[in-house]
Image (cartoon, rainbow, N blue to C red):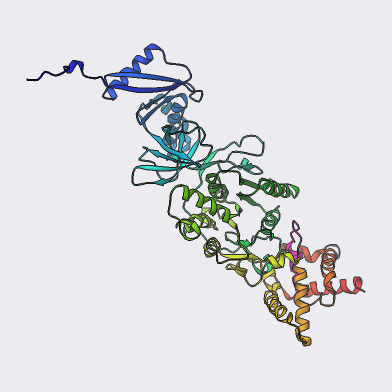
Amino acid sequence: MIKSNFDENEQEKVILTVEIQCVTPPLDYQLEKLRSFFLSEYEADDIDFIIKKTPGVIGGFRIFVNDESYDWSTLGRIRQLRKSFLSLAKGHDPAHIISLLREGIENFELHVGHEPVGFVSTVGDGIATINGLHKVRYGDVVLFDSGVKGMVQDIRSDGTNGIVLFGSDSEIYEGSRVISTNRTAGIPISPKILGRIVDPLGLPIDGGPDIAAKEYYPIERPAPGIIQRKSVNRPMETGILAIDSMFPIGKGQRQLIIGDRQTGKTTIATDTIINQRDKNVICIYVAIGQKASSVAKAVSTLKKYDAMDYTVVVSSPASDPASLQYLAPYSGCAIAEYFMYHGRDVLIVYDDLSKHAVAYRTLSLLLERSPGREAYPGDVFYLHSRLLERAAQLSDSLGGGSITALPIVETQSGDVSAYIPTNIISITDGQLFLESNLFFSGQRPAIHVGLSVSRVGGSAQTNVMKKSVGSIRLDLAQYREMQTFSQFGGDLDSGTLKQLNYGAGLMQLLRQPGNSPMTLPHQVITLICAREKIFTDIPLKKIKSVQQDLLSFFDHHYSAICHKILLDPSYSPALHQEIKDAALDYLNHHML
């Protein structure tokens, strides 16, 4: 019989490594209690304590053993107490809440159980791959040792998870620990967020005080169902004559603004925000991948016209990592939903979703997802559909609030058949197409009548606007067609010349400088005067100045007509005749 080199008592001991993070190191008696606890919980012969001083652990200890963690810090105790309070308050009569909380404090016992811990296997380019944390869900927020947060964006069959980071990865290394926060990505919010500029995580970046957040709103949630909605039937007035007359936007609608760069897309959005002053509408402007100077210019414009009082700016400039640019529109939508579910009307601008798609493509390629058309992942349609479907007009039973979405998309050389533009066109309820040639010829806003459409249409217009427009859109379409053929030369009959002059006059009337929205009475007066050919005999170069002079004449001498339209926006032949007579009075006394 061969004798063993060592007997049972001399076998190699199993040493368990326990890392204790703290500010004040544990005393000897505390270490003995910890030793007894962990020897009873794990199969080990002895404990090797590693004590690390960590300033973030305020009181108590945070302990890591293998792939598990124990949060016995003061903050951990507060979290547990808060969680127990929330479970007590849920479903109970508010009148008895004090006694319930008192009872909860008296019976509170600290939970000493463990939570799973993951470890970083690879990190780089704002992406970390982790092992462990097998129970995390898509969209959950995780916390790294360095204090950087991330979000689960890839759950793989081999047990690893892909995490996009919300901060620098310079202090995250292979083997770094990561724990789950047990909640999905959200944004802290309260009514005090109005007038502020925040990042996609809800942190103020305007140098002002912290936002006293009362609620934590998830950035992603299901869109309201059919039963929770009602039809779109109230106008969201932009103050831009060409839009309000021919392509009206309703509260709860999704209207795409599309065109090449530098064609006035952002100007239309900011003008619409400015026009909501004194109309009880909350506005959200989401800047995605823009230059910081462009965002500052937009904010400066809003402040100049006192629009920041009812506006929130969510900014993720081009210098931000792709993960924050990806989050930005969802964070803005969460803010909008907070106000919508409180019964408010909200206007949200996404500027712009083409850069958002590029940020998502960047993340997807770094997460090693298969590229598809134009290198975008296959779920890029779902990326924007789940965002824009959250725009809605809620039913009266849910408070009647609404979210109106104005997504902006940039095209290349007017190519609306590209992947992202076609995707978003199919999601939205219409589009305003801005044409480069019109813009550079001085026609601003440069809205292409033929390619623009509003699928909500007249149901979102006031009666007086709907009746005043008449056939102006058709007249403009005919003018554009005749203008094309007239360029080939040749003699034109008098009827064609008359139609061309009339169309050119309409184009002049629809010109509108930025940051100067028109009131409803001014829009109605302009449209009726155009239909009555009031401006036909006026030289093209003078039409715009005559229009402004005419509107000023109405304000001073026929203000009763303007007040009538504001108080009762319904059309009548008598109103039409009053406006016509007043315009003729202007011509007789001022155009001699």
Q: Nearer the viewer, residue 222 or 85?
A: 222
The span shown in magenta is: 513-528
Q: Does residue 574 appear to the left or right of 78 in the view shown?
A: right
Q: Residue furthest top?
A: 28
Q: Which sits in the foreground, 103 or 309? A: 309
Give the percent coordinates (x, y) of residue 529.
78, 73
Q: Is 158 left or right of 471, judged from the image as shown?
A: left
Q: Residue furthest front?
A: 2
Q: Is residue 400 at least partly visible in the picture?
A: yes
Quadrant (top left/top right/bottom left/bottom right) for the N terminus: top left
Furthest residue in direction right, as rendered: 592
447 sits left or right of 357 in the view: right
Quarter where residue 469 is shown: bottom right
Tell me, yes or no, whether the highlighted magenta stretch contains residue 400: no
**How many numbered marks appear?**
0
Which residue is at the front of the view, 565 or 173? Answer: 173
User: Residue at coordinates 52% horizontally, 34% vertically from top-left?
Assistant: 170
In the image, is residue 232 above or below residue 335?
below
Rendered residue at 55%/41% (across/down): 201
Q: Is residue 33 above or below residue 382?
A: above
Q: Position of residue 253 (x, y in %)?
A: 58, 61
